[in-house]
Image (tube, rainbow, N blue to C red):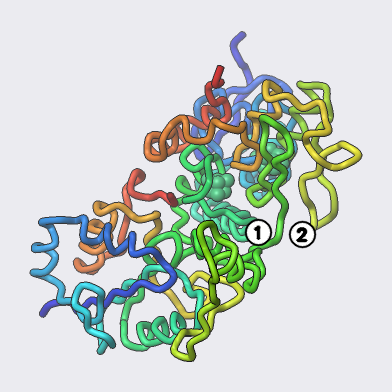
Amino acid sequence: MKLKVATCSLAGCFGCHMSLLDIDEKLFDLLKVVEFDRSPITDIKHCGPCDIGIVEGGVCNAENVHVLKEFRKNCKVLVAMGACAITGGIPALRNNVDLWDCFQEVYHYGIGLENGQIPNDPELPLPFDKVHPINEVVRIDYFLPGCPPSADAIWKFLTDLAAGHEPKLDYEMLHYD
Amino acid sequence: MTKTCTFTLDGKTIPFEEGETIMEAASAAGVYIPHLCHHPEFKPHGSCKLCTVNIGGRLGAACTNRAADGMKVDSETEALNADRRALTQMLFVEGNHICPSCEKSGNCQLQAVAYHLEMLTPHFTHFYPARDIDASHPDVLIERNRCILCELCVRASRDVDGKNVFGIGGRGIKSRLIVNSASGRLADTNMSVTDRAAEVCPTGAILRKRHGFTVPIGKRLYDHHDIAEVPEAGLKEPRRD
Ligand code: SF4
Ligand code: SF4
Ligand code: FES
């Protein structure tokens, strides 16, 4: 039976997902052993029971937390992929800037802006004052660092996991940048 | 001069001269003991505790404990490396180490030690402390978010440059790198970019300006070499001029 895998991007840049796609033709090999559930690749909006959940990005707003909890509830094994999921990453650079100042800068004073407005639609998720890595919200089983992790690292990690052993990255595959 | 005394390190015989520390003797014999605040050119500091080894059943810093004839030292044990990993993780969460945005990434000793110890996550809750940057000096930048308080810059400025530009102020978790000028700004000191203190920092906390990306990310020292193979090399970056 194929392994069910779900993926999502929270407060990330989709770079990790691009790196996942970067495993190129090996994706076909991967698809022989895994089947994607909720993922930007399938466009399925909610995940059902899965073997592996892969999360890119940290949590920067209320919706991120809902998605993360949905993944934790449904996935037997949850993986934090990339610097942002593991440390907060680049979005966490705003953690010492006041949220209001941040909005002012982005929507009012940024270069080239005129008559800016701070979006305030009730549909928009509530932003947090700080960005957090996902292991500060739910339990995480594995961490795959990198900004993004290389396609080789992702491949090695997933094939190790699919084969049922502890993922082990070679020296050059382990990096934080 | 041939060394006559020996001790064992993980079962290997290490020769040493009277007065040498465990760290000095091990380095001379080509054996790596993880460390951050130790630098062969400077007086031992003994603060990071990464080099902690088991000396005949007692834990002690390899960089401050003298070697003794016949002593039995263990370093590469699972327990010691687990402690080292935990210490490294604490250093990461205590500061703001966002490696993807750091000029030092790939040449950073803190990061390299973390790679060596196969640290996959900083694990502990991040502090995200508020720390200042000092960009006042024309050639040297201070990025306190990345300082691990190893005092190598303090030692270099005081003992080699003879300038005493840096110090550590505050206590405990409030300790921070300070600059010895009335304004507290680096621009108001006699610090020069050619000072030893400008290149000794193991992390990206003291950087020479306009230099950060001379070597692109991915082509840097620890991108390809485990720090155990090149323990001191990261400290001496090639000069720009
Ligand atoms: S100083 Fe080292 S560990 Fe800290 S952000 Fe820079 S590269 Fe990463
Ligand atoms: S600035 Fe660098 S050299 Fe100085 S104490 Fe901090 S980490 Fe050490
Ligand atoms: S290297 Fe020995 S305590 Fe830091």
User: Looking at this view, is A73 or A106 the one in front?
Assistant: A106
Label 1 to label 2: alpha-carbon separation = 8 Å
| Displayed quadrant of residue B138 | top right
> First in sequence: mark 1 or mark 2?
1
Q: Taking B65 as reference, is A30 above or below it? A: below
Please rate how many residues cluster around mark 2, counting C-alpha atoms within 10 Å: few if below 14, some from 14 to 19, many from 20: few
Q: Are marks 1 and 2 in contact (CB under 8 Å)?
A: yes
Inspect the image, locate mark 2, and give the three-letter code of the amino acid beneath it.
Answer: Ile
Q: Is residue B107 above or below residue A127?
A: above
**Dividing the picture into quarters, in which one does residue A4 lie?**
bottom left
Label ID, residue B94: 1
- State the image coordinates of residue B150 (x, y, percent, origin top left): 70, 42
Q: Nearer the viewer, residue A102 or B66?
A: A102
Marking on residue B148: none
Can residue B125 be seen here?
no
Q: Secondary structure at mark 2?
A: helix
The residue singled out by tag 2 in the image is B173
Q: Quadrant of the N terminus of chain B?
A: top right
| Residue at the spot 58% in from the left edge and 30% down from the top edge | B235
Q: How many marks?
A: 2
